[in-house]
Image (cartoon, helix red, strand yellow):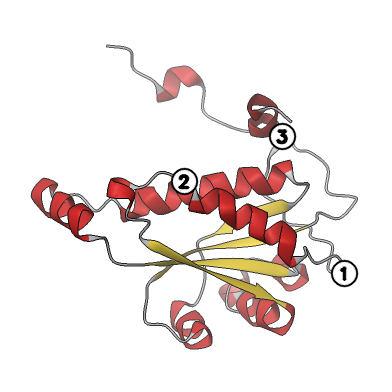
């Protein structure tokens, strides 16, 4: 699948097939795409935790407070993205420029991850609503949890939806 087609057809999945769990080899390919993402000073300030089986159920439950992410109970796997410290050169640059590049670095890695997943026939949903303290305890880390990617195979009835996006004119100013 070419990149243009991927950007046109990748969508957030909220209807996962609960009985089809992606195998470790496929998930490794997805994680490899994230590993190759660019980052400030090649610092890669993130760590990925892969949850399947019972751990996936616990991660899914941590995303469902206040009635959110009800679909997460059917998702067979999750990739939790935790923020890590910069390497020395990125830390100096961030301080000098008063910029924290880690959010952008995580976004780049996650973007590559979800598009590789799509290319391999997997579906994803990037989640920002979760109980961070529960996840930190589950993962045995004090690192900030920044995103969770629900990942698996979509149910057969999960049809491609029409994308609702701002127009290019709303997003771009030519100077």
The reply to whether the C-beta atoms of the residues labelled 1 and 3 are less than 8 Å apart is no
The percent coordinates of residue 84 (x first, y second) are 34, 67
Left or right of residue 43, residue 110 in this image:
right
Which element carries disc 1, helix, strand or loop?
loop
- Above or below for 19 versus 62: above
- Above or below for 37 versus 168: below
Residue receiving disc 3: 9
Asked if residue 163 shows in the view, the reply is no
Please tell me the numbered disc located at residue 37.
Answer: 2
Which element carries disc 3, helix, strand or loop?
helix
* Dot 2 or dot 3, earlier in sequence: 3
Residue pushed farthest top? 175
Q: Residue shown at 53%/45% (left/top)?
A: 111
Q: Residues within 10 Å of mark 3 (few under 14, many from 20)?
A: some
* Label 2, label 1: how far apart the Cα atoms are: 31 Å
The quadrant the N terminus occupies is top right
Q: Nearer the viewer, mark 2 or mark 3?
A: 2
Residue receiving disc 1: 19
* Label 2, label 3: how far apart the Cα atoms are: 21 Å
* Dot 1 or dot 3, earlier in sequence: 3
Left or right of residue 13, residue 43 in this image:
left
Residue pushed farthest left? 96
* Label 1, label 3: how far apart the Cα atoms are: 23 Å
Q: Residue shown at 65%/45% (left/top)?
A: 116
The quadrant the C terminus occupies is top left
> Image quadrant of residue 60?
bottom right
The percent coordinates of residue 103 (x first, y second) are 36, 53
Asked if residue 127 shows in the view, the reply is yes
The reply to whether the C-beta atoms of the residues labelled 2 and 1 are less than 8 Å apart is no
Residue placed most toward the observer, 38 or 144: 38
Which element carries disc 2, helix, strand or loop?
loop
Residue pushed farthest right? 156
């Amino acid at each position: 699948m070419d990149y243009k087609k991927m950007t046109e057809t990748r969508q957030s999945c909220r209807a996962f097939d609960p009985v089809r769990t992606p195998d470790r080899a496929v998930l490794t390919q997805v994680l490899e795409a994230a590993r190759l993402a660019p980052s400030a000073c090649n610092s890669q300030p993130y760590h990925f935790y892969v949850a399947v089986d019972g751990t996936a159920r616990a991660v899914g439950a941590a995303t469902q407070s206040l009635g959110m992410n009800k679909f997460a109970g059917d998702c067979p796997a999750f990739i939790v993205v935790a923020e890590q410290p910069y390497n020395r050169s990125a830390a100096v640059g961030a301080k000098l420029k008063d910029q924290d590049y880690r959010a952008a670095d995580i976004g780049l890695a996650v973007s590559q991850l979800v598009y590789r997943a799509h290319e391999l026939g997997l579906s994803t949903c990037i989640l920002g609503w979760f109980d961070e303290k529960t996840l930190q305890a589950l993962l045995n880390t004090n690192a900030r949890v920044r995103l969770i990617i629900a990942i698996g195979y979509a149910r057969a009835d999960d049809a491609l939806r029409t994308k609702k996006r701002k127009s290019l004119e709303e997003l771009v100013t030519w100077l």
